[in-house]
Amino acid sequence: MTTSSPHIPADVAAHVLSHFGRGGYPAGDWAESLISLIDRADMANRARLANAFPDYGAAIYLAKYDEDGITTLQQIAGLPQAPITCTRCRDTDGPFTAAGLCEACDQNTPADSIR
Ligand SMILES: [Zn+2]
């Protein structure tokens, strides 16, 4: 087992997602308190808590600091993925540009003329 990527069980991912309001389901009182404590800890204390509770520590790190962390946790928890949508018109038809725009928006079509 490596300390850099501890195994995150599905229930831990669901608990942490729930704490951050991103799906999943709430932990019990004790575990929710632990998540809250790790979430609020300063760097030194977060590291100490994550050392004692590597699964929760890793899941909270993903939720707070990893760009794709929420998606990763949702995959671990077995939650359905939200579809990729255009950042301008919210359409789900791809392909999308690097800026997150659909082809129509990328060609500067006014959003209200698309539908
Ligand atoms: Zn669009």
Image (tube, rainbow, N blue to C red):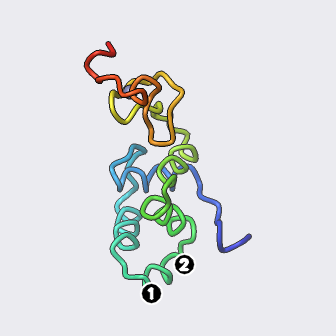
* Disc nearest the viewer among 2 and 1: 1
Residue tagged by mark 2?
A: 52
What type is the residue that disc 2 sits on?
Answer: Ala
Q: Residue 52 location in percent, x, y?
A: 54, 78
In this view, 12 is above or below 85: below
Note whether 6 is above or below 102 in the view shown.
below
Q: Residue at x 36, y 73 (%)?
A: 37
Q: Which residue is mark 1?
A: 44
Q: Amino acid at mark 1?
A: Ala
Asked if residue 9 is positioned above or below residue 84 in the image, the reply reads: below
Kindly check if marks 2 and 1 are in contact, taking CB atoms under 8 A apart as contact: no
Residue 99, picture quadrant: top left
Residue extending farthest left? 112
Q: Residue at x 65, y 66 (%)?
A: 5
| Rendered position, 37 above or below 99 | below
Residue extending furthest toward the bottom: 44
**x and y, in percent, of residue 100 in the image:** 45, 38
- Secondary structure of residue under mark 2: helix
Q: Quadrant of the C terminus?
A: top left
